[in-house]
Amino acid sequence: MAKTMSWHRITLSRQEYESGEIYVLLGAFRAAYVARNGPEGMAMFGGWSDDDTAFLVYTTPRSVRHITPILDAYSAKQSKIPDPSGLSLIYGDESGFSSFEMGFEA
């Protein structure tokens, strides 16, 4: 499945974020992470879009096989590796970001 090798992005509107949807997403991700004993590289990062109208949530490629139903529920889109500036770890193994930087050139 092509999904497994890609980063994915979930976009929450400001209203969705402010109404607490980020906590629903966090809870679902955390449950999958814990159920699978914290797989190496499985992580979720987030930050505000440049225009501050949406909160962007990125999941690492190693997360995909564990959270496919979540990605489907949130209509996640495949994404290139995100720019780490402005992103914070929401949950998971922080090495998930650095382990995928190798092999990518600007």
Image (cartoon, helix red, strand yellow):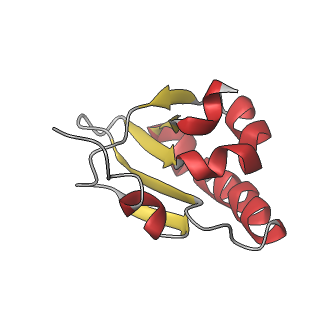
Identify the residue at horizontal 60%, vertical 51% (top origin). 62
Identify the residue at horizontal 45%, vertical 68% (top origin). 95
Task: Give the number of marks.
Answer: 0
Given residues 30 and 41, the one toward you in this image is: 41
Identify the residue at horizontal 55%, vertical 62% (top origin). 41
Q: Position of residue 89 (x, y in %)?
A: 44, 65
Q: Which image quadrant: the N terminus?
A: top right
Q: Which image quadrant: the C terminus?
A: top left
Given residues 71 and 26, the one toward you in this image is: 71
**Is residue 7 toward the left or the right of residue 28 in the image?**
left
State the residue lying farthest toward the left: 106
**Is residue 73 toward the left or the right of residue 95 in the image?**
right
Given residues 19 and 94, the one toward you in this image is: 94
Q: Is residue 12 visible?
A: yes
Q: Position of residue 94 (x, y in %)?
A: 46, 69
Up/down of 61 relative to 45, above or below: above
Q: Is residue 19 visible?
A: no
Residue 49, quarter of the rendered image: top left
State the residue lying farthest toward the front: 103
Q: Position of residue 77 (x, y in %)?
A: 54, 26
Q: Position of residue 57 (x, y in %)?
A: 49, 46
Identify the residue at horizontal 43%, vertical 43% (top origin). 55
